[in-house]
Image (spheres, grey):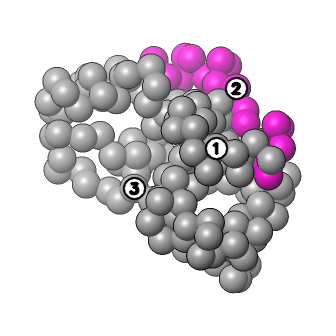
Amino acid sequence: MRYLIDSNILIYPNRTTHPFDIHPTFWEKMSSILNRNDVMSIDKVKDEIYNHKDKLTEWCKTHIPKAFWNSTTSSIVEYAKIQNWAQSKEYNERALADFAYHTNADPFLVSFALNQKRQGKDITLITQETSNPESKRVIKLPDVCFEFEIRYLDINDFFREINATF
């Protein structure tokens, strides 16, 4: 199994639950986890994180290997399929525009996972987002995963699955 990390797995702890100055051991453990061969992310997530130019950006530059960040260029066919699916649903125009905006990593995460799955590779998306299939104002990552049969976990279930303890 391979694990694909959403930006909120790093951004949310940094800003809210595990700031660097209070929880250094959390970040030491995260560094170890993110250096595993079966854990990865994509270039669009890197861009979301690096655009903030904060402590998390600096931490990522020094603690995450370059190989962790995968290119999404080979997932363009899947990306188009995901955008077409979104357009066929009853989301409002703002939700569709946000989902299609070039800096939004969410559709690229699913397209990358779908591309990996089509290559016969087992992959699970790790995100803090929660499903809300009735939403018309925002397209939630778990709902897209469900539609395209991409497995996803929240951060705690991910830690349990890889036997990580803090």
In the image, which disc is placed on residue 57? 1
Residue on which disc 3 sits: 129
Q: Residue at x 38, y 22 (%)?
A: 101
Residue on which disc 2 sits: 71
In the depicted structure, whether residue 7 falls above or below residue 126 = above
> Residue 48: where, in percent of width, then height?
53, 36
Which SS type dominates the magenta stretch? helix
* Residue 155 horizontal side relative to residue 59, left or right: left
Q: Residue at x 75, y 56 (%)?
A: 34
Mark 2–mark 1 distance (CA, rounded to whole Å) = 19 Å
Amino acid type of the residue tagged 3 in the rendering: Glu
Q: Do the CB atoms of the residues marked 2 and 1 lie less than 8 Å apart? A: no
Asked whether residue 125 appears in the rendered view, the answer is no
* Residue 74 horizontal side relative to residue 135, left or right: right
Mark 2 and mark 3 lie on one chain; the one further toward the N terminus is 2
Asked whether residue 41 appears in the rendered view, the answer is yes
Foreground: disc 1 or disc 3: 1
Residue 138 colored magenta? no
Mark 2 and mark 1 lie on one chain; the one further toward the N terminus is 1
* Residue 127 horizontal side relative to residue 131, left or right: right
Which of the 4 quarters of the picture holds residue 116?
top right
In the image, which disc is placed on residue 162? none
In the depicted structure, whether residue 160 falls above or below residue 50 = below
Secondary structure category for the residue under label 2: loop
First to last magenta residue range: 63-80
Instruction: Name the foreground residue: 3 vs 68.
Output: 68
Amino acid type of the residue tagged 1 in the rendering: Thr
**Circle 2: is it few (<14), some (14-19), or many (20+) Cα within 10 Å?**
some
Secondary structure category for the residue under label 1: helix
* Residue 10 horizontal side relative to residue 37, left or right: left
Rendered-image quadrant of the C terminus? bottom right
